[in-house]
């Protein structure tokens, strides 16, 4: 293979994924492996680099055709120094210069951003936001991650914490959040928290089709909730609609804060498709202002679980575009 490629790495606490990605965002080949959370940072980085090099060897790709690598990592991060300051999922990682360690191991330039930003950039560059303008992505999974792309650039903020939109407060004094606040939208509108709220309602005595599962100690998830809704379960319908309402309110706040062309919903809850998209759009239209017709398009993500590796590779391609004359990746 002679075409130039970038290496995209999505660095998770459970698994890491590596992909070789063309300049148009196509994934040429990819692989994954479990993350050893007890290993030293150096050994984990070596494992990641070894997998990337194996993909290059298997694809018969010459090293001179690799423009660089991009890494999406859990944070918080220090972008200037290329460091993972701390990671909940990687307890041995404290102030790890991951960018430079990986660059040295691969002998390539490495671009670093957090995993949510990388996924958002992937959707902006090659997915649901392709060809559009300013863009915000909400990932509705275990928590509520987010990324903001303005003018083709990921927004980091003065303290490197911009885009923590899951911690917008939508219910003052509401449910406690692991961040230390109360009433964060993450506690109402993420896939895991929807399931947890249904579970709690059943434990408190509300009758549901899922009551036998809860009594037997069987875990439920967002998919289970959606299935029960389809069978007419009133508890699941109520909590799902509340989640969509709070998510719509968050989208109204995003509209006024960033005025994006689009807001894209991804992650486990978004796998419900129109079951989440239609009520969010409806509640958004009911709650937003009437002074201007500047409503963002609310869409579902298109890249699925490849968004992180595609976006990470896109960071590498953008770094190339910034140092030599060529077409930018920005739409």
Image (tube, rainbow, N blue to C red):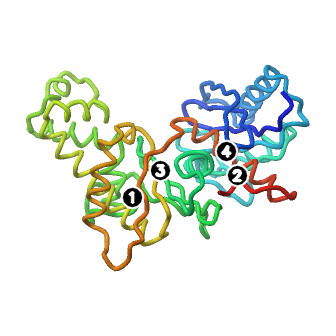
Kindly report the distance in space between the C-alpha atoms of the residues bearing marks 1 and 2: 24 Å
Q: Which residue is mark 3?
A: 145
Q: Nearer the viewer, mark 1 or mark 3?
A: 3
Tell me where residue 1 appears, x and y as whole percent.
83, 27
Image quarter where the C terminus lies is bottom right
Instruction: Choose between 49 and 122: the one closer to the eye.
Output: 122
Checking the image for residue 180, the label placed there is 1
Query: Could you tell whether 205 is left or right of 54 in the image?
Result: left
Q: Which callout, 1 or 3, points at the residue further toward the start of the chain?
A: 3
**Which residue is label 4 attached to?**
312
Percent of width and height locating residue 206: 9, 39
The location of residue 75, given as percent across then percent down, is 58, 50
Q: Residues under labels 2 and 3: Cα distance?
A: 20 Å
| Whole-number angstrom distance, CA of label 4 to CA of label 2 | 16 Å
Describe residue 133's horizontal placement relative to residue 138 as left or right: right
Q: Pointer 1 and pointer 2: residues touching (CB < 8 Å)?
A: no
Nearer-N-terminus badge (1/4): 1
Tell me if label 4 and label 2 are in contact, CB under 8 Å.
no
Cα distance in 3D space between marks 1 and 4? 30 Å
């Amino acid at each position: 293979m002679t075409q130039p490629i970038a290496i995209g790495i999505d660095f998770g606490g459970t698994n890491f994924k590596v992909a070789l990605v063309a300049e148009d965002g196509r994934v040429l080949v990819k692989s994954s492996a479990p993350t050893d959370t007890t290993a030293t940072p150096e050994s984990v980085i070596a494992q990641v680099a070894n997998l990337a090099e194996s993909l290059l060897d298997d694809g018969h790709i010459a090293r001179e055709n690799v423009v660089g690598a991009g890494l999406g990592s859990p944070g918080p991060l220090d972008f200037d120094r290329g460091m993972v300051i701390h990671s909940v999922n990687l307890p041995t990682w404290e102030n790890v210069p991951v960018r430079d360690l990986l660059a040295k191991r691969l002998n390539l330039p490495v671009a670093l951003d957090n995993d949510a930003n990388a996924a958002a950039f992937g959707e902006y560059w090659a997915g649901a936001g392709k060809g559009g303008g300013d863009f915000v992505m909400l990932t509705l999974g275990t928590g509520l991650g987010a990324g903001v792309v303005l003018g083709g650039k990921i927004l980091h903020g003065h303290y490197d914490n911009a885009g923590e939109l899951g911690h917008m407060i939508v219910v003052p004094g509401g449910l406690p959040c692991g961040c230390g606040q109360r009433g964060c939208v993450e506690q109402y509108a993420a896939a895991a928290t929807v399931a947890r709220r249904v579970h709690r309602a059943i434990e408190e005595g509300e009758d549901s089709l899922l009551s036998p599962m809860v009594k037997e100690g069987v875990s439920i998830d967002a998919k289970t909730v959606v299935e029960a809704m389809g069978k007419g379960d009133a508890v699941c319908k109520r909590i799902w609609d509340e989640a969509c309402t709070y998510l719509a309110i968050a989208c109204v706040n995003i509209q006024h804060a960033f005025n994006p062309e689009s807001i894209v919903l991804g992650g486990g809850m978004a796998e419900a498709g129109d079951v989440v998209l239609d009520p969010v759009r409806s509640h958004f239209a009911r709650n937003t202002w009437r002074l201007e017709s500047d409503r963002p398009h609310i869409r579902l993500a298109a890249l699925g679980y490849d968004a992180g590796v595609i976006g990470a590779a896109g960071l590498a391609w953008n770094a190339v575009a910034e140092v030599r004359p060529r077409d930018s990746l920005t739409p």
